[in-house]
Image: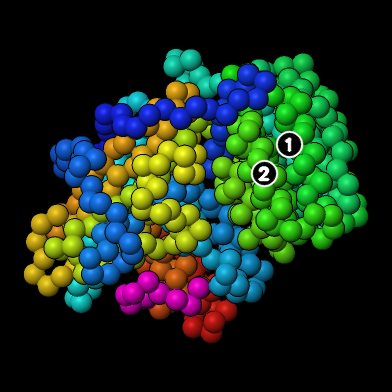
């Protein structure tokens, strides 16, 4: 069903001057996201042509119905919501609907998108019928090139400032112990030319270790990690401020400079106002190019605050609740993704009003961008690194007898070094929706199941019928057997738990 392979198109727009602070080169770090791989059920045909700016319709004032043609959002690869929901279900409780963000569910799984040969994005679009009432599901997939290897010169060095919550609540099993385990793993896996600083905070914040090169400082880093102990209340504001101060003190020209906040995000003393903390994070990003990544832990977790902080800090979040997850995040994701492929990346999907009656983007409520800001390179987008995918799923209702172009998906991003703007586009035709969801590729079906699961937990659909949890669990079981993917098996188990907690199994 997938018909379009991505390629980089001609540049558009003007470079935006990068922020300057003591001659530092702006960079960012993407720590998560799911790598794509070929799937046993995916079909491919020749790539569609690249679409020029003139092919994309002018912005409309509204999105969704009738003549509303555009849907625009900043790219996002957060996965914390899905991880936190799985933790809640494993603890025997249904999650609060407000903590369920569908885009973080669908972005938690490997995909089958083709990768571009160079920097930027490959764009894929596919879809399937979702019933006899005109509804279909359309998947927009964006993929970056694989991580650079030694033969390609490798990645730039990293300067990472870890800001660790050591408040009393972090004493609970599965909080500070997992953070320390992850930091020890990181110390072993980072390269000799990388640098690490360590800040701890409870009611006050302290820099335990200034920026230290790994080459001759591994033992000092391990000793600092071992000294972390839970104590007192949570002054998140002090931790964020001290963390950025340490990052500024240790800025490295030509390196990836990033703050990594590791916390349950339950601020209860000092500056607890989210907007004030967000302003501080945004100022540091805009002036100095230091971005923020969040690692959430704990059965009680300030999910909303962590997500808002990292969104404003041009970063993203993951949630860790087990030693296996800590190993994956700190041993695999972070070391291999200390690099940046695209800055301020945004996607815009233009639906053809001749064929589409209605369209709904599933999730991304906190990442919506005004249609007219799509080509405003001063408007904030998302930062994406190598080896990652971004997925957006749309519910689309076709007009009766519709035939022809369904939609065109365009991604726009800035080169992280030159700030030059680039775009790539792909389209989907109504004739490409000849299969049902169950006949689509396994990875497409996993995306659909994850989205329906999120909708069921939020107790709100997206315009079309949502399967009951037992049926969804059966579908997930079949996909887990077909893909032999442990993460799909975890999805199936989570759906079963939710059904049982609701008394449906």
Q: Residues within 10 Å of mark 1 (few under 14, many from 20)?
A: many
- Residue 169 picture quarter: bottom right
For the point 87% across and 38% down, which residue is it? 206
> Residue 476 location, x and y as percent?
41, 64
Magenta part of the protein: which range?
458-467
Q: Is residue 90 visible?
A: no
How far is disc 2 from disc 1 in space, using C-alphas?
Answer: 8 Å
The residue under the point 40% across, 68% down is 452
Q: Toward the viewer: 262 or 404?
A: 404
Give the dominant element type of the magenta stretch: helix, strand or loop: loop
Question: Does the CB distance between marks 2 and 1 fall below 8 Å?
Answer: yes
Q: Which residue is mark 1?
A: 244
Disc sitting over residue 281 in the figure: 2
**Image quadrant in which you'd find residue 429:** bottom left
Please report the residue visible at 31 percent of the width from the left and 32 percent of the height from the top: 12
Q: Residues within 10 Å of mark 2 (few under 14, many from 20)?
A: many
């Amino acid at each position: 069903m997938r018909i379009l392979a991505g390629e980089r198109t001609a540049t558009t727009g003007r470079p935006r001057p990068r922020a300057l602070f003591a001659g530092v080169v702006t960079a960012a770090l993407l720590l998560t996201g799911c790598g794509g791989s070929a799937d046993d059920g995916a079909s491919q045909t020749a790539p569609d042509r690249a679409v020029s700016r003139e092919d994309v319709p002018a912005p409309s004032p509204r999105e969704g119905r009738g003549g509303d043609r555009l849907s625009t959002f900043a790219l996002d690869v957060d996965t914390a919501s899905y991880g936190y929901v799985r933790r809640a279900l494993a603890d025997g409780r249904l999650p609060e609907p407000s903590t369920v963000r569908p885009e973080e569910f669908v972005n938690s799984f490997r995909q089958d998108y083709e990768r571009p040969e160079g920097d930027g994005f490959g764009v894929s679009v596919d879809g399937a019928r979702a019933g006899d009432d005109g509804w279909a599901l359309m998947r927009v997939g964006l993929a970056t090139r694989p991580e650079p290897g030694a033969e390609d010169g490798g990645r730039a060095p990293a300067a990472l400032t870890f800001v660790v919550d050591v408040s009393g609540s972090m004493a609970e099993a599965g909080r500070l112990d997992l953070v320390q385990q992850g930091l020890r793993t990181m110390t072993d896996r980072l390269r000799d030319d990388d640098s690490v600083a360590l800040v701890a905070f409870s009611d006050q914040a302290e820099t335990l270790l200034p920026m230290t090169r790994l080459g001759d400082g591994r033992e000092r880093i391990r000793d600092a990690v071992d000294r972390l102990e839970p104590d007192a209340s949570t002054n998140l504001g002090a931790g964020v401020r001290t963390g950025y101060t340490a990052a500024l003190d240790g800025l490295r020209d030509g390196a990836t400079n990033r703050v990594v906040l590791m916390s349950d995000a339950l601020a209860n003393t000092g500056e607890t106002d989210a907007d004030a903390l967000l302003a501080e994070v945004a100022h540091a990003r805009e002036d100095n190019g230091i971005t923020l990544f969040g690692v959430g832990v704990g059965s009680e977790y300030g999910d909303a605050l962590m997500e808002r902080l990292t969104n404003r800090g041009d970063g993203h979040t993951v949630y860790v609740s087990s030693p296996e997850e800590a190993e994956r995040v700190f041993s695999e994701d972070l070391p291999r993704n200390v690099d940046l492929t695209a800055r301020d990346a945004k996607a815009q999907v233009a639906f053809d009003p001749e064929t589409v009656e209605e369209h709904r983007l599933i999730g991304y409520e906190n990442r919506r961008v005004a249609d007219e800001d799509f080509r405003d390179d001063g408007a904030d987008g998302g930062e994406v690194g190598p080896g990652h995918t971004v997925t957006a799923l749309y519910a689309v209702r076709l007009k009766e007898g519709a035939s022809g172009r369904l939609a065109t998906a365009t991604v726009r991003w800035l080169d992280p070094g030159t700030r030059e703007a680039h775009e790539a586009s792909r389209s989907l035709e109504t004739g490409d929706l000849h299969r049902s969801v169950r006949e689509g590729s396994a990875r497409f079906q996993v995306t659909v199941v994850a989205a329906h699961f999120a909708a069921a937990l939020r107790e709100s659909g997206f315009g079309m019928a949502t399967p009951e949890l037992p049926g969804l669990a059966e579908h997930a079981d079949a996909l887990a057997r077909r893909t032999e993917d442990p993460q799909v098996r975890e999805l199936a188990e989570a759906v079963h738990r939710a059904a049982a907690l609701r008394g449906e199994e």
